[in-house]
Image (cartoon, helix red, strand yellow):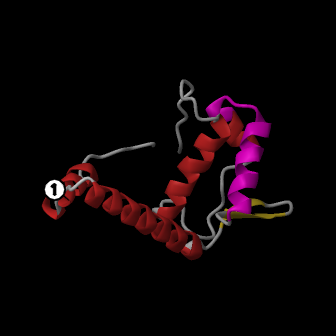
Amino acid sequence: MITIDYTSRLPLYEQIVERFQMLIIKGILPSGSQMPSVRALAVDLALNPNTIQKAYSMLEQQGYIFSVKGRGNFVADVHTQICEKQNRCKADLKELVSHARELDISEEECHRLIEEIYHTEVSHD
C-alpha cells in the first residue's frame, strides 16, 4: 500500500503520514474505508508498532482519519483538508510569483516553468 524510504532524512512516521495523506486526498483510500491495523502495517513495513501509532495519531489530529473503539481506524471525509491544502498551494504560488516579478521573470517564462514542473512526475508511492 505504501513504501518507506529508509535512507530518507524525513522521520519514518512523517513519511507514513505524508503517504497516507496523498492516498486519502487522491481518493485511493475513500472516506469511510478502514485503514490497515497498526500491527499489520508495522509487520508489512518492518517497523515498530509505536511508529505506526504515532503516524495514525498525527493523521487523526489533522482530521484525515478517525478511530472507532474496538474496530480500528477509518478514513474521514477530507473535503476541508483538501480545501486547506489547495489554499496553501495558492498562497505558495502567489509568493513565488511575487519573487519571480522581483527577479524580472516574465509571465511567459513563469508559465513555461510551471508547465515543466507540473509535467515532471514526482512520486512518493
Between 8 and 37, the residue placed more toward the observer is 8
Question: Which is more toward the observer, 69 or 82?
Answer: 82
Residue 45 within the magenta-colored segment of the rendering: yes
Amino acid type at mark 1: Glu
Q: Residue at x 59, y 35 (%)?
A: 10
- In the image, taking residue 49 as reference, residue 77 lies left or right, namely left
Q: To which quarter of the image does residue 80 belong? A: bottom right
- What residue appears at the point 21 percent right and 58 percent down from the top-left corner? 110
- Residue at point 77%, 46% (across, down): 53
Q: Residue at x 72, y 42 (%)?
A: 52
The x, y position of residue 71, in whole percent, is: 80, 61
Rendered position, 13 above or below 8: below
Q: What segment carries the magenta color?
A: 43-62
Q: Is residue 70 left or right of residue 57?
A: right
User: Residue 72, located in which quarter of the rendered image?
Assistant: bottom right
State which quadrant residue 8 falls in: top right
Residue with the mark numbered 1: 109
Magenta stretch: helix, strand or loop mostly: helix
Specify whether 16 is left or right of 67. Answer: left
